[in-house]
Image: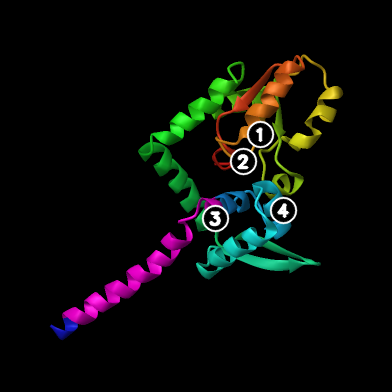
Amino acid sequence: MEQLNLDFSFKERLYQQYARIGKSLSSDKRLEILDLLSNGPKSVESISQHSGMTVANVSRHLQILLDAQLVKFNKKGNYVIYSLANPEILEFLMSLWKICEIQLSDIPRIKDELLQKYEDVQTISKNDLLKKMESKTIVVLDIRSKDEYEAGHISGAISVPIEELDEYLQNLPKDVPLAAYCKGPYCVYTTHAVEEMLKKGFTAYRIEEGIHDLLK
């Protein structure tokens, strides 16, 4: 009986450690921060700018993620730069997003609501995209920030942060088909960017997959 109690104590301590991760993920804001960091290292100020949260709130959420050892940091000049603590965390996040999309009917419904607002925006699959890139019949735009592009991008994609898109399009022939991608399949910037391209007379597509799926 004493040995059995010891075994139960071991199991209890083990699940308490697992719960540290679970508790740290119980906030939509912390999930958003992890998603942002999955696209590359960022300062507190950059996370604040991307998320719309205050610097104070970002710092508070980062401390919780640090305690759960999901993120790490290093200093670069006067800035503290945060990143995911381990490449396995990216795999975990991608699995989490996929499970949520399968199990929670609200998620595809929210996606459909977004796409219905942009009825003229067409999507292109990864396979079709790769074929067009191989035949050099399409230009692929990475509309994330420069630092995210430098952290990882599709080979051959051009870095055009969304705030620079209008200027870039001014010098581009209208007969060049375009495709854009951003952080993930639910990134609203991609849909907005493609709509702007269509308004300016370009043939343009929204890439269905997010950056991590594209790099597989």
Q: Secondary structure at mark 1?
A: helix
Of residue 179 and residue 102, the one placed in the foreground of this image is: 102
Whether residues under marks 2 and 1 lie with C-beta atoms below 8 angstroms apart, the answer is yes
Residue sitting at x 72%, y 53%? 46
Q: Which disc is residue 30 wearing?
A: 3
Q: Which disc is residue 183 wearing?
A: 2
Q: Secondary structure at mark 2?
A: loop
Q: How would you classify the magenta stretch by its main secondary structure?
A: helix
- Mark before the other along the chain sequence, 4 or 3: 3
Q: Which residues are magenta?
A: 4-31
Q: Is residue 60 above or below residue 97?
A: below
Calculate the distance from the C-alpha at mark 2 to the C-alpha at mark 3: 16 Å
Q: Position of residue 55 (x, y in %)?
A: 69, 59
Calculate the distance from the C-alpha at mark 4 to the C-alpha at mark 3: 15 Å
Quadrant of the rendered structure where residue 160 is?
A: top right
Residue type highlighted by circle 1:
Tyr
Residue sitting at x 42%, y 38%? 101
Instruction: Check residue 216 for magenta coloring.
Output: no
Calculate the distance from the C-alpha at mark 2 to the C-alpha at mark 1: 9 Å
Residue type highlighted by circle 4:
Ser
Residue sitting at x 33%, y 68%? 15
Q: Which residue is mark 1?
A: 189
Q: Position of residue 168 (x, y in %)?
A: 83, 29
Residue type highlighted by circle 2:
Lys
- Mark 3: few/some/many CA within 10 Å (<14, 14-19, 20+): some
Left or right relative to 74: residue 92: left
Q: Which residue is mark 4?
A: 46
Which is closer to the viewer, label 2 or label 1? Answer: 1
Which is closer to the viewer, label 2 or label 4? Answer: 4
Residue type highlighted by circle 3:
Arg
- Mark before the other along the chain sequence, 2 or 3: 3
